[in-house]
Amino acid sequence: MRKGVLYRCREDRVVICDTCAHRCEIRPGEVGRCGVRSNIGGDLIAEYYGIISKYEIKKGVSIGITDDEDLWFMVGTVGCNFRCSSCRFLDFSYGNLIDYRDNEQVDPDRLIEDAKLRGLRSIAFGFNEPFVEIEYVLDVFSIAKKQNFKTAILTNGFFTVEALNLVAPYVDRYVVYVKAFTAHSFKLYTGVSWKSNVVFENIGYMLRNNYRVDVATILVPGVNDSVFEIKSLARWILYNMGSGTVWHIFPFKPTMNMYVYPPMSKEKLIKALDIAVSEGLNRIYLH
């Protein structure tokens, strides 16, 4: 547990969290939509600070970091500002957060040492949404950069510019997982109402400020895999990021506990590739 950053407290002790685009107004004793940022006595508290939900070691390119063959220490925390019905990490994103409350807190120094013991010099936060645990990300990455680690954030893009600017000095790469293009598909995918294209606005801001951004999409059958959705996303990438931009396309893969949607077929994945190429993109990475 730790006092949060990026919040305002009103006279009625309601806390406004400025970490993600929801900008939750949290009453005393209540929690934000992410499930992990609470108002305790008029202060914003990161209740799950240092709680790790998942570790994996992955090649950079396999998680959407273009042209990176290094092994990365991929770390998941707890909480998320989306409610994706296709989420493969539902338990620690928003399903059963209480199960993680009593887990051991992993200090930032120890997390970096864990990576080094595995012979790794690259660390990324992902699985759930890293920005909802921004305090921990900042503490870990500030130590990592002093020790010449590479750092990355895999995000849904639904953060505030204030949060982005706070982490930017410590982040080498960003992978923005763009869920959908239309408001209908975005709501169907994430459970969140579209807010003036905030994800695309954030990517634009990152590009204008020379942040290294990769774009990825997980295609879910019947949700965001229509010809119109794929064409629209491809066109946006082409006109805003350029024809040489790599678009990482991942197929949805159900787990034992997540079978709301069927797996994405190889045929549909290849069709998405063909559509993207026909729209002018020449670097599509199918996973």
Image (tube, rainbow, N blue to C red):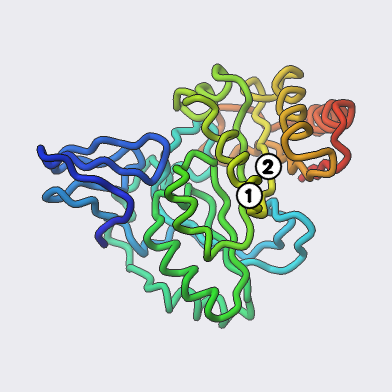
Mark with earlier residue (2, 1): 1
Q: For the point 78% across and 45% down, which residue is it?
A: 246
Where residue 12 appears, x then y in whole percent?
10, 37
Closer to us: 53 or 37: 37
Where residue 67 appears, x then y in whole percent?
79, 58
Could you say which quadrant of the image residue 48 lies in?
Answer: bottom left
Let me know if residue 1 appears in the view: no
Closer to us: 44 or 88: 44
Q: Amino acid at mark 2?
A: Ala
Q: For the point 67% across and 37% down, which residue is it?
A: 217
Where residue 8 appears, x then y in whole percent?
24, 45
Residue corresponding to mark 2: 216
Which of the numbered marks, if any, corresponds to residue 175?
1
Q: Amino acid at mark 1?
A: Val
Could you say which quadrant of the image residue 101 lies in?
Answer: bottom left
Q: Is residue 153 left or right of residue 191?
A: right
- Please determine whether, in this image, residue 285 is positioned above or below residue 86: below
Q: For the point 33% across and 51% down, which residue is it?
A: 6
Which corner quadrant holds the C terminus? top right
- Are dots 2 and 1 in contact, CB under 8 Å? yes
Q: Is residue 262 left or right of residue 267?
A: left
Q: CA distance from mark 2 to mark 1?
A: 7 Å
Q: Farthest residue toward the front? A: 208
Callout 1 environment at 10 Å: few (<14), some (14 to 19), or many (20+)?
A: many
